[in-house]
Image (cartoon, rainbow, N blue to C red):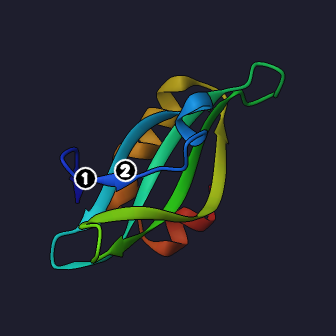
Amino acid sequence: MEQNDVKVIFPNDLLDSKGLMGVITNPNEKIIGFAVLSETNRRQENPYLASVYLLGWNHGLGSYQVIDELYTFDFPTEWQREKFYSDLPTMSALELMIF
């Protein structure tokens, strides 16, 4: 489930170079979540990037914190990156592996 009102603590420099596309959490299980950040690198063949970060719930702070970057997907168009993000919450593991 995508949520825009989720509190996430990001490392200081992470949002300096990337934009937050959104946060995906499971309302029934608050232990983990995912943040998807975007950036554009015109020096690459597929310049539109979407980086998926694993988030962990910190009970003491009452917020999510970034645990690790899982993977960065690259796309030839901004539209394809946006489509990937919108489809991500409902993708099966197999669908995700073919990207």
Q: Circle 2 sits in a helix, a strand or a loop, which is it?
A: helix
- Left or right, 44 with reference to 78: right
Question: Residue 12 occupies which quadrant of the picture?
Answer: top right
For disc 2, the marked residue is 87
Question: Residue 89 occupies which quadrant of the picture?
Answer: bottom left
Amino acid type shown at disc 1: Glu
Label 1 to label 2, Cα distance in Å?
11 Å
Which numbered disc covers residue 75? none
Measuring from the top left, give residue 21's x and y in whole percent: 40, 37
Amino acid type shown at disc 2: Asp
- Residue 26 lies, with reference to residue 24, above or below; the image says below
Name the residue: 32% across, 57% down: 24
For disc 1, the marked residue is 2
Query: Mark 1 or 2 closer to N-term?
Result: 1
Measuring from the top left, give residue 85's x and y in whole percent: 42, 44
Name the residue: 58% across, 41% down: 14
Measuring from the top left, give residue 84's x and y in whole percent: 46, 44
Name the residue: 47% across, 50% down: 10
- Left or right, 61 with reference to 93: left
Q: Pick the residue in front: 65 or 41.
A: 65
- Residue 38 lies, with reference to residue 2, above or below; the image says above
Q: Pick the residue in front: 89 or 11.
A: 11
Q: Circle 1 sits in a helix, a strand or a loop, which is it?
A: strand
Mark 1 residue crowding within 10 angstroms, few (<14) / some (14–19) / many (20+)? some
Q: Nearer the viewer, mark 1 or mark 2?
A: 1
- Left or right, 69 with reference to 10: right
Name the residue: 34% across, 73% down: 57
Quarter in which the N terminus is drawn: bottom left
Measuring from the top left, give residue 86's x and y in whole percent: 35, 44
Mark 2 residue crowding within 10 angstroms, few (<14) / some (14–19) / many (20+)? few
